[in-house]
Structures are given as structure tokens and as C-alpha cells.
Image (cartoon, helix red, strand yellow):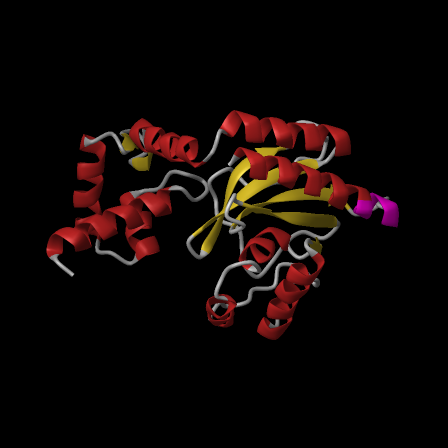
Amino acid sequence: MSNEIASIVKAVDVLNYLKNKPYQFTANQIAEGIHINRTTVHRILKTLISVHMVSKNEESNMYRIAYKAYEIGMTYQSSLDPGKEIRNELRILGKELGINVGYAIKRNMTVVSLYEINEFTKVKFGYTEGTEYSLVRGVTGKTVMAYHEPFSEVEALINNIELVSKTPNTPMDHKTIIEDMACIRKNGYGISDGENILGFVGIAVPVFDQNNRIHGCVTSVAVKDGLADEDYQNIIEKAKKCAHNITRII
């Protein structure tokens, strides 16, 4: 790898680190987080500031993403699909169900939150738009990656992910996770029960593009207490309708 390309890769590593909570860090924290020496990090930050990708708080000496990075992100988002139409479909679903809903997309071998709608429920639970979903916990990442081809690539990836327990319901066996994905493909939807946070149920339905390739999924998140069997089926059917409408948009 040439020095120029290596520098670009390191700059991207810095930007990726800055997208994590609490969204602002000192140079030392960034250096430790991405395992690059502090001098190199300072040089990269200076360059990123000069092109308005990063800004610095002179009082706290902390760095954060700047407006130019946001502009690029919004351009990417706009190029993917007509965002207003997809948001509208999600709002219809969220209002009908009275629960949190979202849309995540497949980006290479990752699953990223694109839209989160939580305005129709008092319990706000969802990922920040733009963050990555786990591929081994919760229903969103597993539902999207269940349809990746060839599936052998997914199996290899899953088997190399370190499993971290978040709740007693977090799957801690790679074989079980791969079997969950096989069930998702068979059933046409996925359900998770408290794998990230106890008391919440996630239901995800895949969304395919016009060429029948996996594009993402519609996920609904509800408080488990009080959900009857017919509620699950109602959520699945309405989410499938939303997914079908999104397929016609993308």
C-alpha cells in the first residue's frame, strides 16, 4: 500500500471513530481508539479541519464531525433512494402500529441504520441514523445478512465475530446465529426477543430491490409486555406491506 493510500485509510479511520458516541474526542482518545500514534492523528486532524470535515472546540480541545462530512453523507443518502417517500411509508407503518420503526440497508458486509421513526410512541428505542447494527444480536442485522449471496461468506464472517452478552437472551453460539438466519430465510421475516435490551421485541421484514437482491429491511420494535399472538402477526403483515411499497420506490 502506497503512503498516500495509507494516509487516506487512516483519515477514514479517524472519521469513523468520530461517528461514535459521544461524537467528540480529544486527539489522544482518537489515537488510542484507532491505534495510530498521536503525531499522525494530529496531522490528519489538521488536514480534515482544513477541508471542513472535522471541527475543533478550542476550549475543550475536542474534535467532532463538521458540516462537509454531513453534506457528503446526505448526498450518499439521497443517491440511494427517494428518502421522503421511504420516510412516509415508515411513518404510515409507525402510526398504524404505534411503535418504533426503522429502515436499515445492506452496505457490503455491514448493515446500517438509514431511517428511524419513533414519533408515535412514548418509549423511544432505536439506533441513531447512520450507525451500524450488530450482525449477531437483534433482528435487523441478521435479517438483512440472511439473504446475502453466497451465504458461505456470511457464515465465515459470523464465525469470526466475538460474541458479547448484552442480556440473558443474547445468542452466544455462532451455530445458533447461523441457524437463526436460515429460519429467517425460510419464514420471510425475523423476530428477536430482548437480545440487546430485555423487554423489547424486534420484528424485521426484508426489502428487495427491483432485481430481487437484498437491499435492507423494515424493523419494528415494541415493548414485549402486552403483545398477544395476533399482535405479532399484525406487525408482520403490515411490515411486509411497507417493505413491498419500499421495493417499488428504490
> Can residue 125 be seen in this snapshot?
no
Q: Quadrant of residue 234?
A: top right
- The residue that appears at 20% across and 31% down in the rendered structure is 51
Q: Main secondary structure of the magenta part?
A: helix
The verdict on residue 231 being magenta is: yes
Name the outermost residue toward the left.
Answer: 3
User: In the picture provided, is 186 more to the left or to the right than 54?
Assistant: right
Marker count (numbered): 0
**Magenta-tinted stretch:** 229-233
Looking at the picture, how far across and down is residue 76, in whole percent?
38, 35
User: In the picture provided, is 48 more to the left or to the right than 211?
Assistant: left
Looking at the picture, how far across and down is residue 58, in whole percent?
27, 29
- The residue that appears at 68% across and 55% down in the rendered structure is 188
> Can residue 250 be seen in this snapshot?
yes
Q: Is residue 41 above or below residue 168?
A: above
- The residue that appears at 66% across and 35% down in the rendered structure is 124
Q: Quadrant of residue 186?
A: bottom right
Q: Nearer the viewer, residue 8 or 229?
A: 229
